[in-house]
Image (cartoon, rainbow, N blue to C red):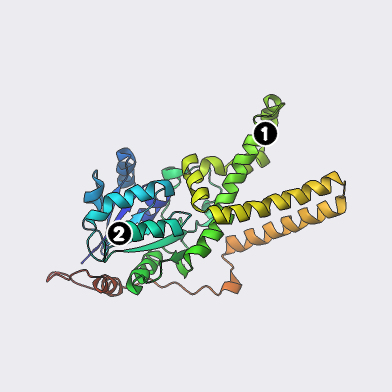
């Protein structure tokens, strides 16, 4: 008996999921679809997929798990297309940085007996500063030894949530559970805001007098701060993420603007003591966070040890969600 997992979207995240599951061939069949067929074929060549589909409905027709690794502005239409072909018990998971709106689409489009569970994938810090992006940055170790946050709407079958946790462990990560609205707030501050800051800095500099000469001087600080606007998705996806998370983003942006205003006031008043204190606090906080991130030292969180699920556990979840066991099915 094998579990059929279909990965829709074969960029960095989708391809990395397939690569991380490469040695689970006795348990999983990895199927993939991308609107860019060349990208899907490349994922197959890299060893991230067992089978490529050129038709999206066919790609999900026998899936037990559908993993949607797409920008948030492409997810609604994708759910509309695949919904009629999902069989009972299928669990649909996604990696979008905005969860509440996707959960709403799931409730609207997914047929009865199918379930939505949202995941936030955390990237191993060893891969945070690599210059590549997209599929070129994919790795089977991208999520190893990291937490993956799992959130689901109220009333979701526990077997569906546990199946998401099983998949997380198979990826080499540790499942942690959160609320949809909590994740929206956290991702607004740590994922969407940095990209908006990058865009704001570019727009504040390239259109100003002096940029013709300034562009020759812009170095590492400028490159690192503006990098997220090119490395983390298309502008349309970023705009959608910010608008779908409107309430949180307005609050977070107000807080950021307030901090900038304080810095401006210190400079206006030539108050070196206050300005230096703010910068020192930021420096120390960043250093502390980065060391914790490198060491995965979240001692106050008491993150549980992650154990690889057995085949019988995974198959049990599927049976609990409505999958029928055939006479030829075997568990280990």
Asked whether, in this view, residue 224 is left or right of residue 8, the answer is right
Q: Earlier in the sequence, mark 2 or mark 1?
A: 2
Image quarter of residue 267: top right
Residue 321 or 226: which is nearer the viewer?
Answer: 321
Quadrant (top left, top right, bottom left, bottom right) of the N terminus? bottom left
Q: Residue at x 58, y 53 (%)?
A: 249
Q: Is residue 43 visible?
A: yes
Q: Residue 43, relative to residue 170: is it above or below?
A: above
Task: Please identify, in this view, whether the residue under mark 2 or under mark 1 is nearer the observer.
Answer: 2
Indicate the secondary structure of the residue bearing disc 1: helix
Disc 2 element: loop
In the displayed image of the protein, which residue is found farthest to the left?
327
Residue at figure coordinates x 37%, y 72% from the top left: 155
253 or 307: nearer the viewer: 253
Question: In this figure, which residue is indicated by the disc labeled 1?
Answer: 205
Q: Quadrant of residue 106?
A: bottom left
* Disc 1 packing (10 Å; few <14; some 14–19; many ≥20): few
- In the rendered image, the quadrant that contains the C terminus is bottom left
Residue 179 at x, y = what percent?
48, 67
Between marks 2 and 1, how big is the CA–CA gap? 45 Å
Give the residue drawn at x 61%, y 42%.
198
Q: Nearer the viewer, residue 193 or 176?
A: 193
Where residue 296 sits: x, y (%)? Answer: 56, 65
Can residue 22 be seen by looking at this rendering? no
Which disc, if any, is residue 285? Answer: none
Provide the residue designation for mark 2: 110
Q: How many marks?
A: 2
> Quick one: label 2, few (<14), some, or many (20+) residues within 10 Å?
many
């Amino acid at each position: 008996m094998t579990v059929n997992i279909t990965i829709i979207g074969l960029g960095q995240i989708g391809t990395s999921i397939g690569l991380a599951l490469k040695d689970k061939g006795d348990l999983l069949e990895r199927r993939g679809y991308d609107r860019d067929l060349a990208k899907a074929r490349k994922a197959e060549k890299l060893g991230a997929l067992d089978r490529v589909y050129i038709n999206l409905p066919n790609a999900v027709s026998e899936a037990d798990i559908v993993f949607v690794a797409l920008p948030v502005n492409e997810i609604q239409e994708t759910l509309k297309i695949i919904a009629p072909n999902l069989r009972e018990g299928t669990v649909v998971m996604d990696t979008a940085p905005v969860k509440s709106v996707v959960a709403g689409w799931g409730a609207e489009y997914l047929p009865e007996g199918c379930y939505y569970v949202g995941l936030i994938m955390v990237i191993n810090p060893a891969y945070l500063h690599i210059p590549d992006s997209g599929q070129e940055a994919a790795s089977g170790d991208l999520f190893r030894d990291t937490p993956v946050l799992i959130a689901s709407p109220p009333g979701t079958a526990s077997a569906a949530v546990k199946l998401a946790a099983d998949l997380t462990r198979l990826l080499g990560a540790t499942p942690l559970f959160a609320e949809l609205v909590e994740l929206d707030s956290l991702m607004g501050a740590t994922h969407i805001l940095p990209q908006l800051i990058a865009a704001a800095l570019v727009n504040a500099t390239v259109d100003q007098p002096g940029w013709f000469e300034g562009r020759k001087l812009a170095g590492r600080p400028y490159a690192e701060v503006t990098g997220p606007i090119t490395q983390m998705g298309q502008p349309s996806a970023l705009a959608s993420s910010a608008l779908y998370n409107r309430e949180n983003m307005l609050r977070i942006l107000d807080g950021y603007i307030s901090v900038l205003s304080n810095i401006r006031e210190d400079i206006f008043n030539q108050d070196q003591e206050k300005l230096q204190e703010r910068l020192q606090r930021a420096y120390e906080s960043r250093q502390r966070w980065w060391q914790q991130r490198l060491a995965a030292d979240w001692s106050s969180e008491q993150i549980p040890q992650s154990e690889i699920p057995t085949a019988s556990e995974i198959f049990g979840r599927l049976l609990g969600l409505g999958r029928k066991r055939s006479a030829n099915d075997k568990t280990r």
